[in-house]
Image (cartoon, helix red, strand yellow):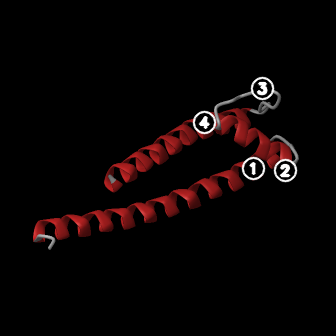
């Protein structure tokens, strides 16, 4: 028979996992929105086609940075700098959430 404190702990863990699931959904929506808006931005401002815009985003946010596509306009450069900061922070938050989720499951 499980004692009361173990049941309470299990309920708290389940509640936290549900909150994290909501956080993951919000994060996924944010990332998708960021990618779509950013691709549109580079398509319009830098006059890149859609594939090149998405390619640049993946290479930049993945911190690879081949350098084959770089923003030429001031607006594109400023947006790319902000995008890099936001992207790194977002991936850091995602990693933190994964680690927290793993810790809860153990």
Q: Secondary structure at mark 3?
A: loop
Quarter location, residue 84: top right
Residue identified by numbered label 1: 39
Reading the chain from its start, which is encountered first: label 3 or label 4?
3
Circles 1 and 2 in contact, beta carbons < 8 Å: yes
Give x and y (percent) for residue 68.
Answer: 83, 28
**Vertical arrangement, residue 74 with respect to residue 92, above or below:** above
Q: Residues within 10 Å of mark 3 (few under 14, many from 20)?
A: few
Residue identified by numbered label 4: 84
For marks 2 and 3, give the CA distance. 18 Å
Give x and y (percent) for residue 56.
Answer: 76, 39
Q: Secondary structure at mark 2?
A: helix
Q: Residue at position x 82%, y 48% from top?
A: 43
Quarter location, residue 71: top right
Residue identified by numbered label 3: 67
The residue lying toward the viewer, choosing from 83 and 98, is: 98
Q: Residues within 10 Å of mark 1 (few under 14, many from 20)?
A: many
Give x and y (percent) for residue 3.
Answer: 11, 70
């Amino acid at each position: 028979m499980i004692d009361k404190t173990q049941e309470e702990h299990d309920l708290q863990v389940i509640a936290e996992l549900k909150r994290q699931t909501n956080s993951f959904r919000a994060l996924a929506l944010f990332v998708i929105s960021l990618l779509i808006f950013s691709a549109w931005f580079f398509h319009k401002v830098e006059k890149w086609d859609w594939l090149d815009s998405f390619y640049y985003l993946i290479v930049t946010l993945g911190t690879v940075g081949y350098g084959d596509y770089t923003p030429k306009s001031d607006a594109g450069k400023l947006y790319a700098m902000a995008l890099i900061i936001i992207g790194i922070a977002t991936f850091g938050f995602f990693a933190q959430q994964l680690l927290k989720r793993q810790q809860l499951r153990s």
